[in-house]
Amino acid sequence: MSAVRLARGCSRLFLLELEARAEPLCFLLRAEPSAPSCPSSTLALLSAFGSARLFSLLVHGGGRVHRARSHAELVNALSSRLPPECRVLPLTAFLPGVKDSVTRGFFLRDESTSSSSTERVLNELKQSHALTVFSYEREENGGGQYWCQELWGCPTTDTEAGENQRLYVTPVTAPQENPTALHIINSVVFYRLDDAYQVLEECRDIIPESKEVLEIVNQQLEAYRRDIRFPVVVIKGLDATGKTTLTESLQQALGATLLKSPPQCLAAFRQRFDSEPPLIRRAFYALGNYITAAQIARESLQRPVIVDRYWHSTAAYAIATAVSGAVEKLPALGSEIYEWPSDLLQPSLVLLLTVSPRERLRRLQGRGLGQTEEETQLEVNDLFRQKVDEAYKRIQNPACVTVDASPSPDQVLQQVLSLIRNKCHL
Ligand SMILES: Nc1ncnc2c1ncn2[C@@H]1O[C@H](COP(=O)(O)OP(=O)(O)OP(=O)(O)O)[C@@H](O)[C@H]1O
Ligand SMILES: Nc1ccn([C@@H]2O[C@H](COP(=O)(O)O)[C@@H](O)[C@H]2O)c(=O)n1
């Protein structure tokens, strides 16, 4: 019941993200009712929920891999099993400034006429997952009106003395540092080989393919160096912006080696890791970048190297997926989440191909190939596309040079060759 103890410590913040609001609602819990330290929008909002039954759910126990998988299972279970009148909102609990303190959960606003089906689902989920469920109730006290949180569905005898104590929801202003950024570092984007490697180590027993991936990493990185001799040019961009067309032409024009991230040696494992939650999926792609880095180092001793996607692509997709809502919600330019991993080989030049959404869609349709789920999302969700593009642009050291890839393939090639000659003195 560590989640409960933290809640009673009163320093843990609960952040409730609501689609229609630019700012999340933020509250902590106190043993005694007290006046809110900020305009009481949280209380006003809870009151506006009217007669709805309110719950929050936090995953606890087990290691981070187990928690990440539980969270992903719960997303599916809640959306498929709760009655349609029960809305599920993302909830984050964290200690301000503490990187690995973020716990992701859910806030339920249940407006179904009978409480029984929601309660049955919650009881079943508590049996199958290490889950703490809290409920919220309005309380009149000394002329004031308060909202209280207490453990739900837990007979007193089952809990340690006082653990099911009522705690008072106390609205506070959201801290400057958004917990999304805290959560991204080492859970969604990895900044050191060891950190990504460690995640797959922790998956060995539950995902057998992890062992094979780690063996490939060990082999490929045996003599990993980070220095390059000939220029290394990375081409990135959204799907169908023309990366394959351009990189193949550049390979020919420059007599270069063409490499890709993820590398071919991981191709057989992609589908398996694509079905895992972000922690595991992104660690897999991060390791792919280190394998590509080792290949770049070897090849660049002999000739220029062109790379079709690299760390920028891994990070930008991961960040855009982790940050819900508008582009403005992305951590600001200069945030450490956009910093290049210190142990990853740096390319000489990074080019970002951009085309208008309409032209990109035309190219996607013209190609008529199947699309991954994320690509489909890009197509239907312009907001997500904007976030990926913006994240690409915010990544620093090395930052990218934007190339307008709308002209004909040959014009794009000439434009890029001239950039490479200028910047890499080829
Ligand atoms: N400059 C261009 N002008 C018009 N069409 C182009 C141009 N470059 C590429 N295309 C066409 O757009 C489609 C997508 O191109 P391509 O496969 O090179 O994109 P991509 O970025 O590599 O996509 P993916 O990331 O999915 O592999 C192809 O049908 C290609 O022929
Ligand atoms: N270096 C990379 C490359 C790709 N990804 C992830 O793969 C998905 C798109 O890849 P396609 O080959 O299907 O275009 C996308 O979801 C990225 O998250 C990556 O992480 N790193």
Image (cartoon, helix red, strand yellow):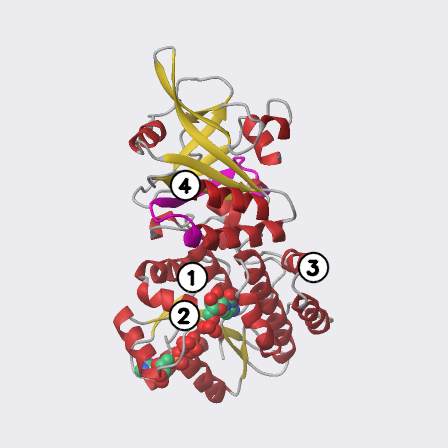
Q: CA distance from mark 1 to mark 2?
A: 8 Å
Q: Which residue matches tag 4?
A: 108
Amino acid type for the residue under numbered disc 2:
Gly
Q: Residues within 10 Å of mark 3 (few under 14, many from 20)?
A: some
Image disc number at residue 381: none
Q: Quadrant of residue 412?
A: bottom left
- Does any portion of residue 103 appear in the rendered image? no
Q: Are marks 3 and 2 in contact (CB under 8 Å)?
A: no
Image height of 57 relative to 71, above or below: above
Q: Residue at x 63, y 59 (%)?
A: 196
Q: Does the beta carbon at disc 2 come under 8 Å from ligand 1?
A: yes
Q: Quadrant of residue 364?
A: bottom left
- Does any portion of residue 1 appear in the rendered image? yes
Most extreme residue toward the left is 358
419 left or right of 362?
Answer: right
SS under mark 1? helix
Amino acid type for the residue under numbered disc 4:
Leu
Q: Which residue matches tag 2?
A: 237
Say which label, 3 or 4, has the lower sequence index.
Answer: 4
